[in-house]
Amino acid sequence: MNGNVSEAEITFDDVCRARELIAPYAHETPVITCSTLNRMSGHELFFKCENQQKTGAFKFRGAVNSVARLTDEEKARGVVTHSSGNHAQALAAAAKLFGVTAHIVMPSNSPQVKKAGVKGYGGRIIECEPTLESRERTAKAVKAETGAVLIPPFNYANVIAGQGTCAAEFFEQVPDIQTMIAPVGGGGLLSGTCISAAAQSPQVAVIAGEPANADDAFQSKAEGRVIPQLNPDTIADGLRTSLGSLTWPFVRDYVDHIVRIEEQEIVKAMKLFIERTKVFIEPSAAVAVAVALYHLPKSEPPARIGVILSGGNVDLDKLPW
């Protein structure tokens, strides 16, 4: 149970073990439907509500799986990460569960609601410039200063295995899903989804939604090599990061399509979803909703489409409309 594993060893068995480990702490989130959105899309849409997960996003799964697996000596040293918000809150909350100190490096432009969440869970915030290079450099300095264990937001096997528990639940809750849609930023959720899909429902098409203004995954898949993110400017703040060395192979080998979503589509999908379902989602989750509503060809009979609503953390004083 102790320690991290390499990319080659991240399997569905790891997802199953993660599921057992996090069960006392994480919610098995509900799946909802909406007849109006079904009519608009021409499909049967099933929405997995990770916006109702603890800390308001799927990130809690991977964070708990990672912190729980630390040795007592590692827990005593504390944990450190860099995150724009959802992993930051999740790691702070997971650390609090196990009595572990959490040092959280956050970009200066992170939403205030996410900073407040980290502080509420007892995390120590260290601000940095809003670039991946600055995030990683600052986290490395904090690690050197404190001796804390680095738990990255996505490029970490125990995080990926934990995120895979979301799709593992989803496939059990909704049989015969034909297409699974997840948003992609760093690729932790998408990689975990690929692992569970391959094991539980290998005929499923895995589609990723990505902001057109932060489309490194789309470019990387098209070129067959990792193309780093450059100055992303998107309302979907959770999707501004680049793919990692552990997540890229899943995107390269298991994702069927990556769909780029324009900013106005993100806002339109977010507003429409909230109006029709009365369920609150953040822009990163709306990216996946936009794929289902606007970018899938209609079929007869309607296809059964699973959509992972990645989170619901939004600054209510800065809604995008």
Image (cartoon, grey):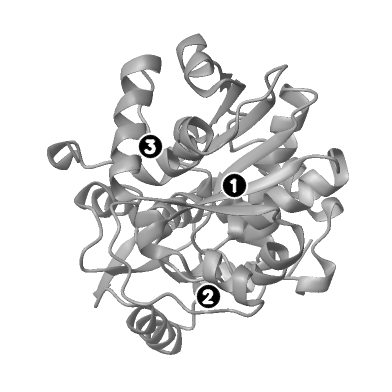
Q: What residue type is labelled 1?
A: Arg
Q: Label 2: few (<14), some or many (≥20) within 10 Å?
A: some
Q: Residue 273 carries which label?
A: none
The disc, 2 or 1, on the residue closer to the chain's N-terminal end is: 1
Q: Label 1: few (<14), some or many (≥20) within 10 Å?
A: many
Residue on which disc 1 sits: 61
Residue 291 percent location from the top left of the image = 50, 40
Residue at position x 18%, y 38% from top?
319
Q: Quadrant of residue 282?
A: top left
Whether the residues at callouts 2 and 1 have beta carbons within 8 Å, the answer is no
Q: Which of marks 1 and 3 is in front?
A: 3
Q: Which mark is residue 150?
A: 2
Residue 28 percent location from the top left of the image = 63, 29
Residue 199 percent location from the top left of the image = 87, 46
Q: Which amino acid does label 2 sit on?
A: Leu
Q: Nearer the viewer, mark 2 or mark 3?
A: 3
